[in-house]
Image (cartoon, rainbow, N blue to C red):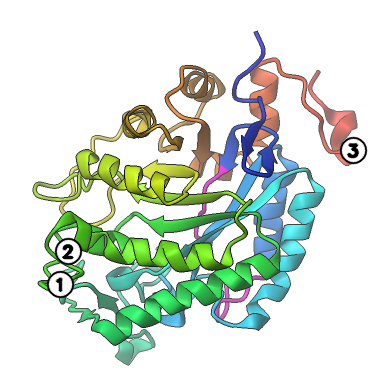
Amino acid sequence: MPSKLFSPLQIKSTTLKNRIAISPMCQYSATDGFANDWHLVHLGSRAIGGAGLIIQEATSVSPEGRISPGDLGLWKDEQMDKMKVINQFIIGQNAVPGIQLAHAGRKASAASPWEGSKKIFPADGGWETVAPSAIGYHDDETPIALDKTGIQKVISDFKSATKRAVEAGFQVMEIHAAHGYLLHQFLSPLSNLRTDEYGGSFENRARLTMQVLEVVQSEWPKDFPLFVRISASDWAAGGWNIEESVQLSKILKEKGVDLIDVSSGGLVSHQQIPLGPNYQVPFAESIKKEVGIMTGAVGLITEAKQAEEIVASGKADLVLFARESLRDPNLGLTFAYELQEDVKWPNQYDRAKIR
């Protein structure tokens, strides 16, 4: 029986050659938001390696929205130049280039993992962070609660970054509303204690995400795929949960979102995540079945047969790989061999093809 994982996926005018996507993975290797040769090789090698969709790391819409000083950004025109080169290379490998636009909110201004991921305070070269409420991710910090002007700037920054993403040649857009970053911070009652129209009820907490979606759609081509990544659960008492995720996904579908990229966690340091293979897949399956929207599954999916089963059984439409693709840039080619699927290798590598 032909592999479902290696069947094409049509989303609007875009066809992915298979259901293998590379998750956005921060490389902490940019300077002032600019991509460089590291990003070209990192992203380009995974396109060579057979994945159908390559999503660039969480790319900040503003300097203060970066997770770390090494994050990519699209807050000025000059940052597009290298991304255009990278995207042209990805397209040349019969893969689709995507981008995840993000704002880190209170989790911004942190060091890279190999520097301890510690908060960098303004006195040490960092910057002031913002959030829906003046509640820090860590006890030793207090972000600035966004006022209406600050919220409008966030919305405007997403709009401008989307316009640049189109010009840079990206063909899939993902809005990052997961992992404890700014939009997720507004969604969750654990981090959003506002009493205005952006806090309290579900509708109010979802308002900023909807406003960002609206301005992204105003710039993003209507025939190009649009994803939203969510954390389906905060894994913490009183937090965002799967029921609210289903409710949000229904609204996103009505507003024209094509696929929900379903992750979880990241909002609070006291989360309790039951890690294990496929631990997030039930969330993707629930949203797909209850909402009738395409979903992407992610999280401790490491084997070809495991990924095949997820797609073949209808739990998700797409499988996104992060750490496993760091271990094996040729993940698509490797999985094709293991599932006995005869896929085209790059011409330059064909003489080494496993037959």
Q: Residue furthest front?
A: 254
SS at circle 1 = loop
**Rendered view: 30 above or below 294:** below
Sequence-first disc among 3 and 2: 2
Considering the image in quadrants, where does the C terminus appear? Answer: top right
Q: CA distance from mark 3 to mark 2?
A: 51 Å
Q: Which residue is mark 3?
A: 347
Range drawn in magenta: 22-36
Q: CA distance from mark 1 to mark 2?
A: 7 Å
Q: Which mark is in front, 1 or 3? A: 1
| Labels 1 and 3 touching (C-beta < 8 A) | no
Q: Position of residue 128 (x, y in %)?
A: 30, 85
Left or right of 344: which side holds 339? left
Sequence-first disc among 1 and 3: 1
Q: Residue furthest bottom?
A: 123
Q: Which residue is mark 1?
A: 135
Q: Is residue 269 visible?
A: no
| Labels 1 and 2 touching (C-beta < 8 A) | yes
Magenta region, main secondary structure: loop
The amino acid type, in three-letter code, at marker 2 is Ser
Task: Return the residue nearer the eye: 18 or 109.
Answer: 18
Give the residue at x 55% y 68%: 162
Q: Which residue is mark 2?
A: 191
Give the residue at x 24% y 80%: 146
Q: Tell whether position 167 is magenta.
A: no
- Report crowding for label 1: few under 14, some 14 to 19, many 20 or more residues within 10 A (C-alpha): some
- Report crowding for label 2: few under 14, some 14 to 19, many 20 or more residues within 10 A (C-alpha): many
| Labels 3 and 2 touching (C-beta < 8 A) | no
Q: Is residue 47 visible?
A: yes
SS at circle 3 = helix
The amino acid type, in three-letter code, at marker 1 is Ile
Sequence-first disc among 1 and 2: 1
